[in-house]
Image (tube, helix red, strand yellow):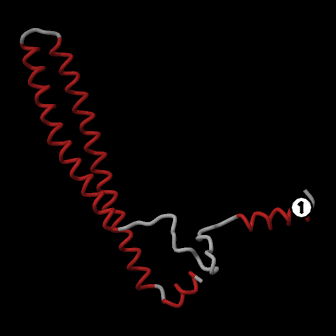
């Protein structure tokens, strides 16, 4: 590639590339339609839903787990091979139920953590950075 071709390729890339900014609107300023918007209330509501789901899965899933365990014990005591199979089902159910509860708790905790981090970031930006510097950054 010749030098002038390289320079032309760089100019072409610069006109197409958009790094860490929004495209300008008709007035030449950054557009107000951000790609990602996070609302604290939405994160809070989703975290609450995940926590409620975990509680319900724990409560309702435990009913099935104990019923399966009781049936497995009775069938095994009666000498039926189905008791061992039902016990294996009980063990698998317990494992899967625990995994699902952990996943719901992880989602809830992560959303709570995200809310906290965003609040800390907003506070830090509001208190650490002078308004003139913020204005210069968004120009």
Q: Callout 1: few (<14), some (14-19), or many (20+) C-alpha neighbours within 10 Å?
A: few
Tell me: 93 left or right of 124.
left
Left or right, 66 with respect to 32, comes to: left
Query: Which is nearer the eye, 98 or 6?
Result: 6
Q: Residue furthest front?
A: 26
Taking 97 as reference, is 6 above or below it? Answer: below
Q: Position of residue 13 (x, y in %)?
A: 75, 63
Name which residue lies at 18% across and 48% down. 55
Residue 128 drawn at (x, y percent): 44, 85
Q: Residue 100's image quarter?
A: top left
Q: Secondary structure at mark 1?
A: helix
Report the residue marked by disc 1: 5
Choose between 97 and 24: the one closer to the eye: 24
Residue visible at 58% across and 70% down?
22
Placement of 112 over or under 24, stated as above or below: above
**On the rendered image, what quadrant is the C terminus found in?**
bottom right
Residue 20 on image: x %, y % = 59, 69
Figure quadrant of the N terminus? bottom right
Image quarter for residue 90?
A: top left
Q: What is the quadrant of residue 118 in the picture?
A: bottom left
Name the spot of residue 56 as percent of width and height, x first: 18, 45
Taking the spot 29% from the left edge, 39% from the top edge, the residue there is 99
In the rendered view, would you say 105 is above or below 96?
Answer: below
In this rendering, is residue 54 above or below 30?
above
């Amino acid at each position: 590639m010749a030098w002038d071709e390289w320079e032309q390729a760089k100019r072409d890339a610069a006109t197409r590339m958009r790094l860490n900014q929004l495209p300008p609107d008709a007035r030449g300023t950054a557009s107000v339609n951000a790609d990602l918007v996070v609302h604290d209330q939405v994160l809070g509501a989703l975290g609450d839903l995940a926590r409620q789901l975990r509680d319900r899965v724990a409560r309702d899933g435990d009913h099935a787990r104990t019923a399966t365990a009781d049936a497995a014990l009775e069938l095994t005591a009666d000498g039926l091979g189905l008791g061992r199979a039902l016990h294996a089902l009980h063990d698998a159910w317990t494992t899967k139920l625990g995994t699902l509860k952990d996943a719901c708790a992880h989602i809830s905790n992560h959303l709570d953590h995200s809310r906290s981090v965003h609040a800390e970031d907003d506070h830090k930006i509001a208190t650490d950075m002078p308004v003139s510097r913020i204005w210069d950054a968004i120009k």
